[in-house]
Image (tube, rainbow, N blue to C red):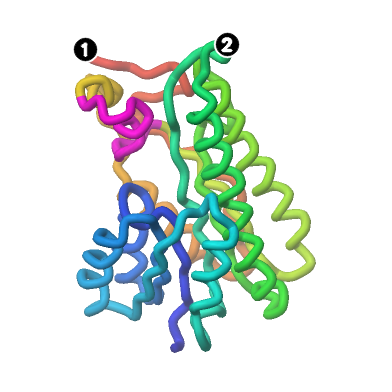
Amino acid sequence: MNKRIALITGATSGIGQATARLLARHEFNLILCGRRKDRLAQLNEELSPLTEVRTLSFDVRNFSEVENVWNSLTGNWKKVDVLINNAGNAHGLDPIHSGNLTDWDAMMDINVKGLLYVSRLVIPGMVERQQGHIINIGSIAGKEVYPNGNVYCASKFAVDALTRGMRLDLNPYNIKVTGIHPGLVETEFSLVRFKGDEERAGQVYKGYQPLRAEDIADTIVYVLTRPDHVVLADIVIFPKAQASSVVVKKTV
């Protein structure tokens, strides 16, 4: 197994899925993680002709589940070279005084604790080998708070802080750490946020050209193919129409 191994969380849709497809074409072996076993199976079938693939189905919110699945890996598959913490979600768009507690728990558990749980299992091997690259997928919501974004923004601010903390703590061990913070990307994001309301979700991306998941995947490949001495530490990516978390030029 001479290729670098990349572990991707949230690989069953959106940015994670697009990244898996692109890395398979750029000399990476893949560990694809997600909750939806059917989608993992489909992705495995699609990408196995291109590279070696392992799939792991678990909920990042449950540490014992994450640990059990991680321990099922054998041999060189535990020698992860690249960790892409992509799993995340947004639930609801309510003001702080009327927020849904279940939504709050989901966002903090997946976006923050899930990232921590996976990282806690993967990073010690990188430290031992004194090599590796961690890419945390944040959001412009982790740079700028917007109205009714309160808890989601807080979770993404936490991702940004954890990324910076990782970079400091892991600097002695030759480990690269990158934070990528997209603006508006057309994925399942808004459909999840609005709990299946397709009409409301669709309005988010009308009147301008949003980013595509493939745009973020392309950036990830660029980050991972820089010379060894180069680290792209902190990247914000907008579509051309977007100027901030709340300023978007729309034609309709």
Q: Residue 238: which numbered mark, if any?
A: none
Residue 157 image position (x, y, % from top left): 62, 34
> Taking 188 as reference, is 87 left or right?
right
Rounded to the nearest whole Å, what is the CA distance between mark 2 and mark 1?
A: 31 Å
**Of 100 and 221, which appears nearest the observer?**
100
Q: Secondary structure at mark 2?
A: helix
Q: Amino acid at mark 1?
A: Val
Q: Amino acid at mark 2?
A: His
Residue 164 image position (x, y, % from top left): 70, 47
Q: Residue 97: which numbered mark, if any?
A: 2
> Taking 129 as reference, is 249 left or right?
left
Between disc 2 and disc 1, the foreground one is 2
Residue 199 image position (x, y, % from top left): 20, 21
Residue stretch rendered in magenta on the structure: 184-198
Q: Is residue 63 magenta?
A: no
Residue 21 image position (x, y, % from top left): 29, 63
**Of 234 and 107, which appears nearest the observer?**
107
Q: Secondary structure at mark 1?
A: loop
**Is 101 drawn above or below residue 77 in the view shown?**
above
Evaluate whether residue 147 shows in this view.
no
Evaluate whether residue 198 shows in this view.
yes
The residue that disc 1 covers is 252
